[in-house]
Image (cartoon, rainbow, N blue to C red):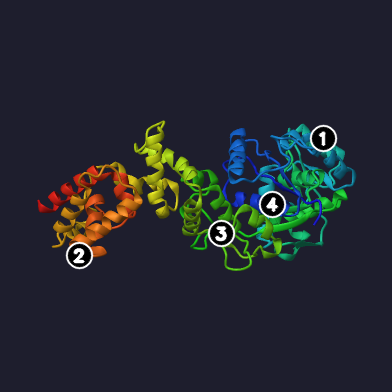
Amino acid sequence: MKDIRVRFAPSPTGPLHIGGARSALFNFLLARKYGGSVILRIEDTDLERSSRESEKDIMDSLRWLGLSWDEGPDIGGPYGPYRQMERLDIYKKYVEKLFEKGYAYHCYCTEEELEQQRQELLAKGEMPRYTGVCYGLSEEERRKREEEGRKPVVRFRVPQDRIIEINDLVRGKVSFESSGIGDFIIVKSDGVPTYNFAVVVDDHEMGITHVIRAEEHLSNTPRQVLLYEALGLTPPEFAHISLILGKDRSKMSKRHGATSINQYRREGYLPEAMVNFLALLGWSPEGEEEVFSVDQLIERFSMDRVAKSPAVFDLEKLRWLNGVYIRNSDLERIAGLALPYLQEAGYASENPGPEEWERIKNVVEAVREYLGALSEITEHVRIFFETQFDFEDEKAAAVLREEQVPAVMEALKSKLAGVDSLDKEGAKKLLKEVSKEVKLKGRKVFMPIRVALTGMTHGPELHDIIPLLGAEEVIRRVEASMAKVRE
């Protein structure tokens, strides 16, 4: 495929959501695979809800995900402007063409009249639609309505008894009957174009070759195809990607997890994990592999492996993927990303010095294999920062009442006496010596030490815990925990 031009065209009425991010990703992958261009266009014709704040949030989220664009409102390009409200003069020229060809007309119907038409059609068992009441009004009838203070909209005259066929890259051949559409509005009474009209003009003017968007836009496509035909333009290739459902197979909502990209960013998900996860929502690679870098996704992506059936948003799978990336990423980076959570919990200073930073990195290294999101780190590192703790349950306390425990604790304290510092290897050696001295192995030795030092029966490896606590603190905790079980 040559000279591919795709666009991501969000409405800036809120943050970038999961569905929008996936659409942006699929467009990005197709364009980058074939050396094409990605255009970011802001569809801001919803004057009441659109804002520059939402536009900035969308751009920030796209950049965070690593989804770059080649043309857009921030960087310009040869087909600008890239905000719809800055393109009104362009739309006017196309409206005039439709009037000249007899495909457009002014409609003066009030909301009440439209509702009456709707109810009459429903009473006949017909699909509600606009029936063309104002089509063919004389100049005198138009003037009379305007004198009444009615501000007209512009409607597109839909040809009747037409079958509109779309060869969708995901769904194959899809057919629609024009008779069920009704004459639709292309310009509102305030002069602002509607979505279906503006998107056709913009996609043509910007040379868009492929439109990859969510399935809910499929019903808009026949209207857009009719507009392309009326204007004598060639439509782009369409690809409508599946809905995203929750695990209960209902439409994705907040109860299935956060819906905006920013929320996942705040919770400590890595951008490469989000991109990997989003790619698998409706696209299936060959083979069993599920962990892909962006470069691998670009190389393997193809529209013929995009599924028709709905994608299921599985938060546990996202947490698993994120955990993979947390474990495999550079420690310095992960510690830096985890630092704000540690600071908020009071476990790290505002500006850690070299010694504190080294300890923070070691703490992160000790617990990162347990993390599904970086925001969870504070639960896992409390044992390194809070010196007072309770046993997690009676089962944990019971471990310290086992008959071999006093001997294990005395051996541990004896081996630690006079030790200034320990590294991981030194801690492993020390634990082996304790086992040898008490002539016991495995759980009988390590579980009591773990409970004595943390109050829990699970968590980071002892050879990670002991060096981070230090010999003096280990001895203090052993004595405090043994005193508790003797009470």
Tag nearer the camera, 4 or 1: 4
Between discs 4 and 2, the one toward the N terminus: 4
Place of residue 144 in the rendered image (x, y in percent of width and height, measured from the top left): 80, 35
Between discs 4 and 3, the one toward the N terminus: 4
- Distance of mark 4 from mark 3, alpha carbons? 20 Å
Q: Residue at label 3?
A: 291
What residue lies at 54% left-to-right and 52% top-to-bottom?
273
- Distance of mark 3 from mark 2, alpha carbons? 45 Å
On residue 439, which mark appears? Answer: 2
Q: Residue at label 1?
A: 143
Between discs 4 and 1, the one toward the N terminus: 4
The extreme left residue here reads: 487
Place of residue 365 in the rendered image (x, y in percent of width and height, measured from the top left): 41, 49
- As shown in the figure, which amino acid type bears the numbered disc 3? Val
- Distance of mark 4 from mark 1, alpha carbons? 47 Å
* Above or below: residue 88 compared with residue 449: above
Place of residue 184 in the rendered image (x, y in percent of width and height, measured from the top left): 75, 49
Nearer the observer, 24 or 371? 371
- Distance of mark 4 from mark 2, alpha carbons? 64 Å
Q: Are marks 1 and 2 in contact (CB under 8 Å)?
A: no
Tag nearer the camera, 4 or 3: 3
On residue 484, which mark appears? Answer: none
Dot 1 falls on a residue whose secondary structure is helix
- As shown in the figure, which amino acid type bears the numbered disc 1? Arg
Q: Quadrant of residue 385?
A: top left
Dot 4 falls on a residue whose secondary structure is helix
The extreme right residue here reads: 100
- Does 445 sit left or right of 166 as displayed? left
